[in-house]
Amino acid sequence: MAELLGTKAVQGEEPPRILHPRIRGDFSGRLVIELNACYCMKWALPQRCEGPASWPDDDRVDGELKCEKWTRDDGPKTNKSSNIKWLLNNLIGMPEPDKVSVDQAYPFAEGKLFFLTITAGLEGYHVNVDGRHIASFPYCTGYNLEDATGLSLNGDLDIESISAGHLPKSHPSFDPQRYLKMSEQWKAPPLPTEPVELFIGILSAANHFAEWMAVRKSWMIATRKSSNSVAWFFFALVNEELKKEEEFFGDIVLVLFMDSYDLVVLKTIAITEYGVRVVQAKYVM
């Protein structure tokens, strides 16, 4: 495996796997190139490339097929004598020699040097082997390239060299939240001065920073761009760090009681009151 890993943001959980390509089969025992992502220890739906190319009508990634047809250029070359042999066999009714099987066309061979390149496009990651495009994997919701802070190589691999560009120039801070959050683009705009159509209150608890960022980087973008909708998080007042989050992002409401699942109904009441009295929304969600 050659994985792009994110920064571990939650104690007791593995770091997110932003790109997880398996390049040597899986539990089925068949040769397969599998691409996936794992967030909060939950896997997405895998993308499996098993030899044939993706259908031409399937969604593409930056114009590239998600799975290319496997071919190999290091097999025996066709020469004049083999062409003559094929022609004679055809004339006397001999069957055509077997074509290269899917396993034989697999782009990796045991004991053979290969060059694996992972590049990032506008819509996803692209995997090339020996200069040939093999697979492309669309970005998962909530992840950007800058979230990848490490490369992990596992399995029966001998590494000759590694070259990386356009990754963070220094190791992220020991405070992963500070490293991930310090971007002005995730800040909420001021509340509209006029009533809005929709107010969305998001129930959450402290120390779920990775989940908050996933929301901010996905569907919450639409509410920040709209003058007719607002989405804010609601937390119980827990600690000073959460207070700093509120001041930085401007999309958090702190309710004045201790955080407990038994008190989630009070958060719900707070959302409805805030949506009606402060935001003056026509609808509250």
Image (tube, grey):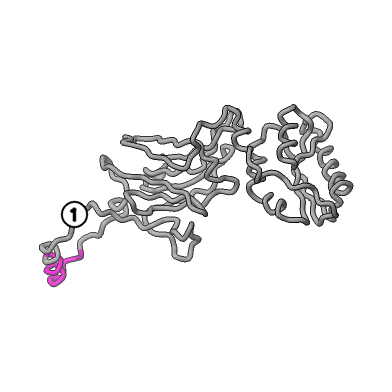
Q: Which amino acid does label 1 sit on?
A: Pro
- Classify the position of the N terminus by image quarter: top left
Q: Which residue is drawn at 69% across and 49% down?
A: 220
Q: Residue at x 81, y 51 (%)?
A: 192
Q: How many labels does the image show?
A: 1
- Left or right: 114 in relation to 169: left
According to the picture, the residue beneath numbered tag 1 turns out to be 76
* Looking at the image, residue 179 lies above or below residue 118: above
Q: Where is residue 108 in the image (x, y as percent from the top left)?
A: 31, 46
Q: In the picture, residue 65 is in which quadrant?
A: bottom left
Q: Residue at x 18, y 54 (%)?
A: 76
Q: Which of 76 and 238 is in front in this view?
A: 238
Which stretch appears magenta?
85-96
Q: In the picture, residue 229 is in which quadrant?
A: bottom right
- Left or right: 256 in relation to 56: right
* Looking at the image, residue 111 lies above or below residue 84: above
- Left or right: 242 in relation to 76: right
Q: Is mark 1 on a helix, strand or loop?
A: loop
Q: Which of 66 and 225 is in front in this view?
A: 225
